[in-house]
Image: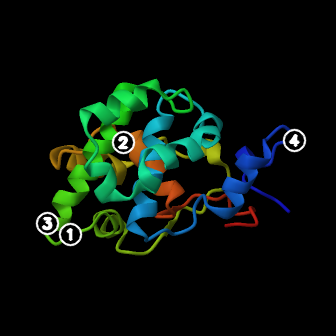
């Protein structure tokens, strides 16, 4: 079975292959799951994806399975406890952004909006297939990700620059960036 190059190397860990095969690039509409993927992508900034995957279970536990209301209610004291948790990536700004971003999603809810609509409206609610022949040719961000990152910042979201937003859009299946000869394209 052929995978995208990044997931098909002999030394690729099984957890990364599973992530590619079972999650990456599959259209996700569930708001809680989208929130999780958005957070995980923000944790990756400056790190590799395998590091984030290795700590995913700890993040799920620490952030109440990414239940938006529970995360939004977390306090400075909770943040201080997270900073002591050796199972997490202990980057205060990233952890604080998770709490802040849950609070911003709750503000969207008050306005009758959702994270799902905010994200999927960027692609008219249908995944965009970039027909990738080689992932090396993809940009790290595009004009849609740049505009969305600006909009998110205006809405009060943090730690979501254009590169992180583009990676999130790939992970959540808004973009089908599986290589065209990948079995999961």
Q: Classify residue 55 as left or right of residue 96.
A: right
Q: Earlier in the sequence, mark 2 or mark 4?
A: 4
Q: CA distance from mark 1 to mark 3?
A: 7 Å
Q: Earlier in the sequence, mark 4 or mark 1?
A: 4
> Residue drawn at (47%, 53%), measured in percent from left and top?
37
Describe residue 152's horizontal placement relative to residue 16 as left or right: left
In what element is the residue under mark 2?
A: helix
Residue 166 % position (x, y) = 43, 49
Q: Which-is-in-front pick, marks 4 and 3?
A: 3
Residue at mark 2? 162
- In 3D space, how far apart are the residues under numbered discs 2 and 3 (Cα atoms)? 26 Å
Disc 2 and disc 4: Cα gap in Å?
A: 31 Å
The answer to whether residue 71 is left or right of residue 128 is left
Q: CA distance from mark 4 to mark 1?
A: 44 Å
Please say if the residues under marks 1 and 2 sit with CB atoms less than 8 Å apart: no
Residue under numbered circle 1: 113
136 and 95: which one is in front? 95
Residue in view at x 34 percent, y 73 percent: 124
Residue 31: quadrant of the picture: bottom left
The residue that label 4 is drawn on is: 10
């Amino acid at each position: 079975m052929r995978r995208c190059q990044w997931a098909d190397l002999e030394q690729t860990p099984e957890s990364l292959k599973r992530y590619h095969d079972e999650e990456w690039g599959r259209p996700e509409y569930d708001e809680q799951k989208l929130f999780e993927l958005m957070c995980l992508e923000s944790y990756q900034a400056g790190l590799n994806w395998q590091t984030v995957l290795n700590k995913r279970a700890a993040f799920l536990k620490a952030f109440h399975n990414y239940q938006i209301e529970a995360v939004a209610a977390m306090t400075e004291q909770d943040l201080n406890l997270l900073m002591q948790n050796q199972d997490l990536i202990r980057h205060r700004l990233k952890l604080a952004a998770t709490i802040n971003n849950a609070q911003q999603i709750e503000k969207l809810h008050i306005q009758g909006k959702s994270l799902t609509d905010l994200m999927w409206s960027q692609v008219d609610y249908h995944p965009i297939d970039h027909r990738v022949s080689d992932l090396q040719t993809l940009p790290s961000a595009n004009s849609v990700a740049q505009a969305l990152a600006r909009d998110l910042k205006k809405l009060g979201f943090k730690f979501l620059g254009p590169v992180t937003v583009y990676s999130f859009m790939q992970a959540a299946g808004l973009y089908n960036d599986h290589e065209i000869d990948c079995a999961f394209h």
